[in-house]
Image (tube, helix red, strand yellow):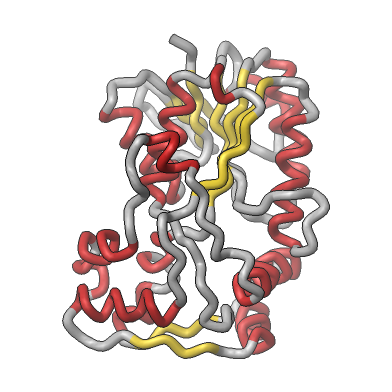
Amino acid sequence: MSRILITGASGTIGRHLVQSLTAQGTPFEVMRSKPVADGRTRVGSYDDVASLTAAFADIDTLFVLLPLTPNKLTHARHVAAAAKTAGVSHIVRSSGAGADPAAGFALPRLQGQVDEILASTGLATTFLRPAGFMQNYLSFMADMVRGGMIYGATADAAQSLIDARDIAAVAARVLVNPAPHAGQAYTLTGGEALTDSQRAAVLSQALGRPVGFTAIAPQAATDAMRQMGMPDELVSWMASLNELVSAGYAAGISPDVQNLLGRAPIGFAQFAAEHQAAWR
């Protein structure tokens, strides 16, 4: 069995991936920025090629999940250089739906540029390109759900969100046997495209109390992100995400989750029912 290294193990996808691999008894290691005495942690920094090269040593299959930071492209170049030097055989990256270096929107263009950097290594690659996460309702949107009103700059357009557990399940399937997936890019979506108002109605049903949605102007959302102190690059990327959702480009439904897992993706109603406690 190949040696697997997971980066981004503490993030939304990474945590579920660690759980999935552990549950199925697949050996793996994780990369962290600081040492942890758990017998499976390697230390590496995206800012330091030498530390990444050391962390990737003797690894066959590398799962790459880069944080959304202003130096994301630099980090991608560091990962690419380290993976080649360390002799990694296969890179599996969590990218984003619509990733394309020539995309007309900033965030999918960035994701496409990162994919291009990793593909240019000549190593086997597999790109997982998930849509927006249902888990956003458990993080930065949780307070709005608890307050009974969700605000968004997405024009109440339909979007096919995916549960991060499905992303992790696909990643685990690929990591265990990566060879058949070499050179592939999978678009990972849910099985339905719902508007913000429709998802609010599902939450209302699950919680037994009203939850609504109010559309806000894109500029208001951009101003709010700047007031929060977000870097300009991050503001631009997130604003472009609102733009592409509003334009209807996030409503597509892909069969890839069904084809890879042999079952339908988790639906938003199931997600809401299973996480009621988070919004009480």
Q: Quadrant of the N terminus?
A: top left
Q: Within the image, what quadrant is residue 80 found in?
A: top right
Q: Residue 209: percent from the left, percent from the top?
A: 20, 86
The residue under the point 31% across, 87% down is 148
Q: Residue 234: percent from the left, percent from the top?
A: 68, 65
53 with respect to 36 (left or right): right
The residue under the point 62% across, 31% down is 184
Q: Within the image, what quadrant is residue 60 found in?
A: top right
238 with respect to 274 (left or right): right
76 with respect to 96 (left or right): right
Q: What is the count of numbered marks?
A: 0
Q: Residue 199: percent from the left, percent from the top?
A: 37, 74
**Outermost residue toward the right in this view:** 102
Residue 195's place in the image compared with 105, above or below, is below
**Outermost residue toward the left in this view:** 208
Q: Is residue 72 visible?
A: no
Q: Is residue 125 visible?
A: yes
Q: Within the image, what quadrant is residue 144 found in?
A: bottom left
Residue 4's place in the image compared with 98, above or below, is above
Q: Report the front residue among 224 and 266.
A: 266
Q: Report the front residue among 92 and 82.
A: 92
Q: Residue 36: percent from the left, percent from the top?
A: 41, 31
The residue under the point 21% across, 73% down is 206
The residue under the point 61% across, 83% down is 221
Q: Report the front residue among 73 and 49.
A: 73
Q: Quadrant of the C terminus?
A: bottom left
